[in-house]
Amino acid sequence: MRIPLVVVVGRPNVGKSTLFNRLTKSKTAIVDDVSGVTRDRLYGEADWNGKIFKVIDTGGYVPGSEELFETAIREQVEIAVSEADAVLFVVDGRTGLTPVDSEIARILRHSDKPVYVLVNKLDNEEMSLNKSEFYSLGLNDVFDISALSGRNLGDLLDKVIQRIDFPDPNNEEDKRLRIAVIGRPNVGKSSLTNALLGSDRSIVTDIPGTTRDSINSIMKYYGEEIVLVDTAGLRKRARVNENIEFYSNVRTYRAIADSDVSIVLIDAQFGLEKQDQKIIDEAVRRRKGLIIAVNKWDLLEKETNTAKIYENQIRSKLGSIDYVPVIFISALTKQRIFKLIDMAKQIEEERKKKIPTSALNEVLLEEIAKTPPATTPHGKEIKIKYITQVGSNYPVFLFFANDVKYIPDSYRRFLEKLIRKHFGFNAVPMTLSFKNKNPEEVI
């Protein structure tokens, strides 16, 4: 199901991160008076009157050299506009109109996306007069707001949700498996996708993608239609390197959200890097099926135990995400690439698997009795009495117990490992939820 994307743009230090935090009800973005403190792009979800949309804060990136400043800002805006369903253009109502604001507005005027000018840092009605000069930008929807206090944001969001398309809950759900090939730039995503689609066993057609200018593809794999979620690269090479990363992050975020199973592609020559781990964390956060595929394996000098050593190095960095399979492939030679599809199909079956309540309680309660959680700080025994699986899109397990707030994270990880040990769910992130409630009240 495609969720609309709203992108926040503007020059540095106008309050984009403060707006992002308020829209997403989070404190993820770093807020500071110094320009350019947002080095990583931020992604979240907003909910307004039951309408959910994704939000991206483009940050306040300032290139190292002054002559690159306008180039960098211009590229970020162009990329944002190409991906967004709506654009929130934030300006500083106290500083007033600047040449960079005018340049951003020029780009936005030529787009076909809804654009809203948010004249920020206007904390009361008296200050709202400051927004008048921003009408000269030639954009119709101008709002005087305070991202810090939330002033006038309700009126803005009412208008935003009227102008973007949301999924129709009455439409029949697409049952086809959706696979996204994700990863950092230049790891071989396009090569792998082309290799999968170019085979004799695939029949390829193009279908409208997650954005107006992108294309997803359908491959027919032994008679079954599978959707490859588009993660195409730059239409043209960005002149500022960090904007390539920004574009890649936007596409990655959308692809994860639109997929059932995400194949995280890493370059065998570089191994698992920090950005790869961020991508994996995002897929886990969204509870998507996961495969780590090490591409360009044909380029390494391989001995008998090279793959095992390499896999151990990856797993040492994954920590608690030790349930994700690692496979070594070559998009160039097509080595093991179709095993990826077989694995993705198996993982999707695992995501949909339902364990009977009777089986969960019979197996797990016996194990829990052998290794119970530690007592509370007051010496009271914690008893887990009942377990059931809930949720439809991915596995969620509900535990009923007394004093659940005293169950530590380490024991919760122990319970997750018990579930995986007895019931599988290989490569599938899961949620464990705990309630202080007697099971008799909910049966």
Image (tube, helix red, strand yellow):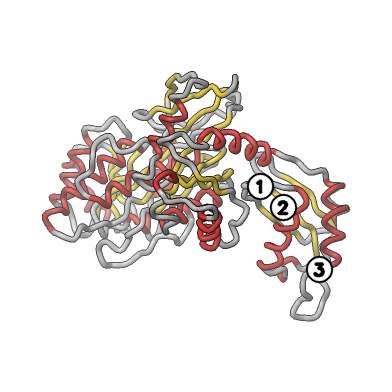
Q: In this rendered view, identify the residue nearer to me: 414 or 271.
A: 271
Residue at 63% from the left image edge and 37% from the top image edge: 348
Residue at image mark 2: 420
Q: Nearer the viewer, mark 3 or mark 1?
A: 1
**Residue sitting at x 77%, y 68%:** 403
Query: In x, y percent, where is residue 420?
Result: 72, 52
Return the residue at label 1: 426
- Is residue 339 visible from the viewing direction of this image? yes
Instruction: Report, in whole angstroms, how far the alpha carbon at label 1 lies from the one at label 2.
Output: 7 Å
Q: Amino acid at mark 3?
A: Thr
Give x and y (percent) for residue 345.
62, 34
- Kindly check if marks 1 and 2 are in contact, taking CB atoms under 8 A apart as contact: yes
Q: Earlier in the sequence, mark 3 or mark 1?
A: 3
Badge 2 marks a residue whose secondary structure is helix
Q: Residue visible at 24% across and 36% down?
A: 236
Q: Residue furthest left?
A: 67
In which quadrant of the rendered view does residue 315 lie?
bottom right
Within 10 angstroms of label 1, few (less than 14), some, or many (20 or more) residues? some
Q: Nearer the viewer, residue 101 or 141?
A: 101
Q: Amino acid at mark 2?
A: Arg
Q: Classify mark 2: residues with Cα within 10 Å, few (<14), some (14-19) or many (20+).
A: some
At label 1, the amino acid type is Asn
SS at badge 1: loop
- First in sequence, mark 1 or 2: give its number: 2
Where is residue 97 shown, x and y percent of the image?
Answer: 16, 52
**Residue marked by disc 3:** 371
**Which secondary structure lies at badge 3?**
loop
User: Which quadrant holds residue 168?
Assistant: top right
